[in-house]
Image (cartoon, grey):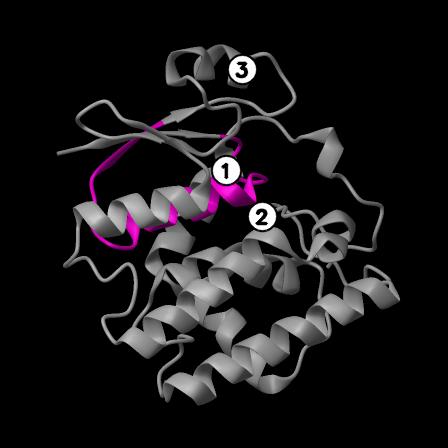
Amino acid sequence: MTYDLVIGDRAYSSWSLRGWFLCDAFGIPVKTHSARLYTDELPDLLKSYFPAKTAPTMRTPDGTVVPETIAIAEELATRHPDAGIWPSDPHARATARVLAAEMHAGFTSLRSHCPMNLRVSYTDCKPTPEVLADLKRLETLWSWARQTTGATGPWLCGAYSAADAFFAPVAARIAAYNLPVGPEAMVYVNAHLAHPSFRRWRAMGMVDGADQEFYRRDYPRR
């Protein structure tokens, strides 16, 4: 039972990373179909995934098309209830869903100022007050999640869940742009960087096509 997943450039497409993690990190077989962002490749590929217009988009083994990452998470959790995509504890599960929903809709300043780019590392990106506010909100959410769920390991709601998959690109941004966060948040970032699925995705992203000019920033590199 293998799922088809349309993704964009691995080095840059943060939403594609989330969609792939929802399969790879939970042992769900997936076949990727990659298209370059900012070219005709993606809309051409998605013609056979109607009504989707973005990456990632998933097609289930029975042919159902599921665009949007939250929908992908919920559909996979329904079809694979034992995979652990959401926590089994009702309180932890509700907390994880809150986290994923806010990540899906928010943090626009951070996303704009620091687009995901797995091929570079900067010493300073001059974060704006709005970016710093986003970082503070992230730390608040992460700390709250761990406290309210009683998580003692590296992840937010106990075992690794969809909530952590949703924050993986944020962890990549914090590391790549050398963003200022506290020690507890940095432990969480480092857990993401060491996760086997993240390491596989980043390794593929390093060789997955040419650099995308849209994501280039003139910050000092390290």
Residue found 34% across the figure and 58% down from its top: 196
- Residue 202 among those drawn in magenta: no
Compare marks 1 and 2 and give the one earlier in the sequence: 1
93 vs 97, left or right, is: left
- Residue 29 among those drawn in magenta: yes
* Three-letter amino acid code of the residue under disc 1: Arg
Residue 199 x/y as whole percent = 41, 54
Quickly name the residue at label 1. Answer: 10
Residue found 82% across the figure and 59% down from its top: 125
82 vs 60, left or right, is: left
Q: Are marks 1 and 2 in contact (CB under 8 Å)?
A: yes
Quickly name the residue at label 3. Answer: 43
Please determine whether, in this image, residue 164 is positioned above or below residue 63: below
* Three-letter amino acid code of the residue under disc 2: Leu
Q: Nearer the viewer, residue 180 or 133?
A: 133
Compare marks 3 and 2 and give the one earlier in the sequence: 3
Query: Which type of secondary structure does the marked residue at label 3 adopt?
Result: helix
* Magenta residue span: 8-32
Q: Quadrant of the C terminus?
A: bottom right
Residue 19: name its quadrant: top left
Label 1 crowd bin: few (<14), some (14–19), many (20+), radius 10 Å: many
Residue 203 visible in the displayed image = no
Quickly name the residue at label 2. Answer: 118
Q: Are marks 3 and 2 in contact (CB under 8 Å)?
A: no
Q: Give the CA distance from mark 3 to mark 1.
A: 17 Å
Residue 17 visible in the displayed image = yes
Q: Give the CA distance from mark 1 to mark 2.
A: 8 Å
